[in-house]
Image: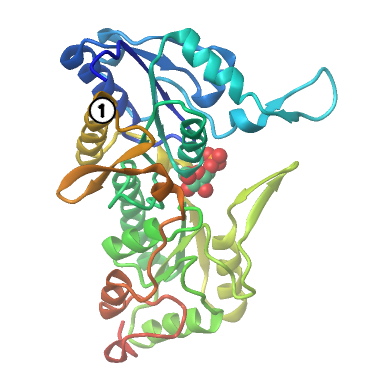
């Protein structure tokens, strides 16, 4: 595989802090260590179909390590296998343009493709690999819901943002004696809520993996009040299920996205108690901003490893962290299922041990009545 002259790289799915660190690491390693050219494909797989690309030079990747977002642009639509084609009038229809995408990759002269993405983009990458495209994946997402890597880059920065928000809510909650709810992202996994809740000392954490009841949340709030703690901090994952077992969505036109469970919990608290409740939805702030040092380093390690994988002919695989090493795993393994918080796992157990409630009534016995 020493003969590879040119590789392509694209970033797909929702952006996250650290993407620019990967693009920089891939470009610098490919150019300076192996003498290859790197083509940057714009706006995810959409750019591969629409022929939007350009050669990445040193000056494109210089000074971007500390910048959030992605210099290449991204999208979480534009799956080439089900590509939205808008006609003159009427609704979009979908076509399989994967053949065009492969032809475009050849036209670009790229002999391998590096895909930086979450489970959606990496599943598409796997389909291309099965069509014979030499693909290497790099795992990114703030949700940390990818199997086969200890952690994704972007998650640590999101965790800092969420923890900072909890710290800020703490002082105002205490002053007004309120229940303050913070709704965080994470899709169907509760990692951000759980770990930010742990770091911020939240009183209640509600995650998709642990069913909760309003009675149990109120019980925790009342226990705290009876001990003189007249405020409570509640962190809610956007994907947490209400006691009817439903996730809550915001609908705009034909599109719906997770969001609104915080408001639902706050309404129930106010209706069932004399306590005031306020909701902060942290939203896309979690995806923005300067990547943390951890994310910059992890992004750099993943980027360098991906180029080494290209050189070694390790295609159909994804770079991953198996602490303390960067390794590679088959893409199938990475996208087989989403990584969830184990409800009986160590982190949940430790959180319960320091008094965090999950709304399931299973408080640590020594914490019943604790504040
Ligand atoms: O997967 C990352 C993520 O930020 C999720 O946490 C969230 O549910 C989703 O993307 C939001 O997507 P969009 O940017 O399309 O609203």
All told, the count of numbered labels is: 1
Residues 191 and 340: in front is: 340
Residues 31 and 192: in front is: 31
Q: Is mark 1 within 8 Å of ligand 1?
A: no
- In the image, what residue occupies the spot 46% across and 23% down? 73
Residues 360 and 86: in front is: 86
The answer to whether residue 177 shows anywhere in this view is yes
> Where is residue 353 shown, x and y percent of the image?
26, 80
> Where is residue 152 shown, x and y percent of the image?
32, 45
Above or below 228: residue 210: above
Above or below 354: residue 42: above
Residues 195 and 93: in front is: 93
Q: Residue furthest right?
A: 89
> Where is residue 113 shown, x and y percent of the image?
40, 23
The answer to whether residue 283 shows anywhere in this view is no
**Applied colour scheme:** rainbow
- In the image, what residue occupies the spot 36% across and 63% down? 194
Above or below 49: residue 312: below
> Where is residue 338 shown, x and y percent of the image?
45, 55
Q: Quadrant of the C terminus?
A: bottom left
**Mark 1: few, some, or many residues within 10 Å (few <14, many ≥20)?**
some
Occupied quadrant, residue 266: bottom right
Occupied quadrant, residue 344: bottom left
Left or right: 190 as drawn, with respect to 314:
right
Q: Quadrant of the N terminus?
A: top left
- In the image, what residue occupies the spot 46% across and 66% down? 207
Above or below 371: residue 108: above
Disc 1, SS: loop
- In the image, what residue occupies the spot 44% across and 34% down? 15
Q: Which residue is mark 1?
A: 66
């Amino acid at each position: 595989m020493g003969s590879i002259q040119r590789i392509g790289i694209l970033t797909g799915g929702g952006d996250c802090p650290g993407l620019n660190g990967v693009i920089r690491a891939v470009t610098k390693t490919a150019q300076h260590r192996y003498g290859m050219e790197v083509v940057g494909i714009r706006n995810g797989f959409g750019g591969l179909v629409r022929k939007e690309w350009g050669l990445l030079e040193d000056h494109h990747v210089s000074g971007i390590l500390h910048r959030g977002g992605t210099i290449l642009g991204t999208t979480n639509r534009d799956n080439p296998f089900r590509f939205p084609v808008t006609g003159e009038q009427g609704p979009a229809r979908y076509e399989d343009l994967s053949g065009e995408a492969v032809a475009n990759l050849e036209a670009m002269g790229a002999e391998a493709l590096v895909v930086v993405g979450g489970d959606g983009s990496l599943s598409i990458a796997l389909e291309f690999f099965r069509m014979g495209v030499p693909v290497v994946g790099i795992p990114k997402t703030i949700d940390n819901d990818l199997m086969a890597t200890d952690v994704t880059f972007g998650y640590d920065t999101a965790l800092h943002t969420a923890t900072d928000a909890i710290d800020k809510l703490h002082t105002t909650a205490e002053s007004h004696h309120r229940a303050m709810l913070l709704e965080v992202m994470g899709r169907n996994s509760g990692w951000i809520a759980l770990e930010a809740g742990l770091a911020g000392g939240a009183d209640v954490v509600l995650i998709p993996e642990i069913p909760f009841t309003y009675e149990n949340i109120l019980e925790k709030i009342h226990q705290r009040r009876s001990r003189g703690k007249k405020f409570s901090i509640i962190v809610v994952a956007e994907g947490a299920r209400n006691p009817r077992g439903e996730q809550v969505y915001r609908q705009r036109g034909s599109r719906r996205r997770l969001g609104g469970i915080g408001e639902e919990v706050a309404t129930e608290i106010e209706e069932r108690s004399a306590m005031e409740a306020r909701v902060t939805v942290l939203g896309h702030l979690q995806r923005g901003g300067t990547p943390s040092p951890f994310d910059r380093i992890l992004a750099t390690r993943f980027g360098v490893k991906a180029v080494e994988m290209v050189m070694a002919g390790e295609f159909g695989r994804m770079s991953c962290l198996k602490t303390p090493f960067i390794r590679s795993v088959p893409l199938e393994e990475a996208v087989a299922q989403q990584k969830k918080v184990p409800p009986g796992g160590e982190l949940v157990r430790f959180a319960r041990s320091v008094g965090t409630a999950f709304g399931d009534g299973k408080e640590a016995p020594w914490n019943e009545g604790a504040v």
